[in-house]
Amino acid sequence: MYNSEDLEKFYFQYQTEALPHGESLQSFGYQKSISFANRLNVRLNHFKKDLLMPIRNVLVIDVKRSNLKLRRVIQTGTRRKMIMMEPMIRFARIRLVMFHLKS
């Protein structure tokens, strides 16, 4: 596993040696026998997804210290089902979390 310093050194080397010649990041990595050229792209893409996926999956049930539970009643024939629904306030809460992470 490579740490952030290794990736910074590799990317700096790529910018100074290969980028002026129009060489891609992957081909530069393969020429240097460095297998983390693809890993760098995967990490960057994964990092972008990491910022969105866990936050998008957050379910806010507690709003202003009172339990807010939204239920939807579905009638199927003679049976009624209660289904838990996500509160719509979750989008505002997510924006606050993302803002807090950036600062």
Image (cartoon, helix red, strand yellow):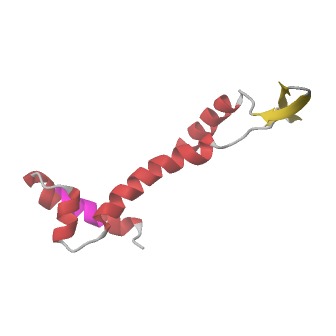
Number of numbered markers = 0
Q: Position of residue 20 (x, y in %)?
A: 10, 52
Left or right: where 65 falls relative to 53? right
Q: Residue furthest front?
A: 77
Residue at the image position 64 percent from the left and 43 percent from the top: 57
The quarter holding residue 19 reads bottom left
- The magenta stretch is 9-15
4 up-or-down from 44: above or below = below
| Residue 2 appears anywhere in the view | yes
Locate the N terminus by quadrant.
bottom left
Q: Residue furthest left?
A: 21
Residue at the image position 71 percent from the left and 27 percent from the top: 88
| Residue 68 appears anywhere in the view | no
96 up-or-down from 51: above or below = above
Left or right: where 91 falls relative to 7? right
Q: Position of residue 34 (x, y in %)?
A: 25, 72
In the rendered structure, does residue 90 fall within the stretch colored magenta? no
Residue at the image position 69 percent from the left and 32 percent from the top: 90
The quarter holding residue 60 reads top right
Left or right: where 27 falls relative to 82? left
The quarter holding residue 39 reads bottom left
Locate the C terminus by quadrant.
top right
Left or right: where 60 falls relative to 54? right
Q: Position of residue 87 (x, y in %)?
A: 75, 30
Residue at the image position 90 percent from the left and 30 percent from the top: 79
- Please name the predominant secondary structure of the magenta segment in the image: helix
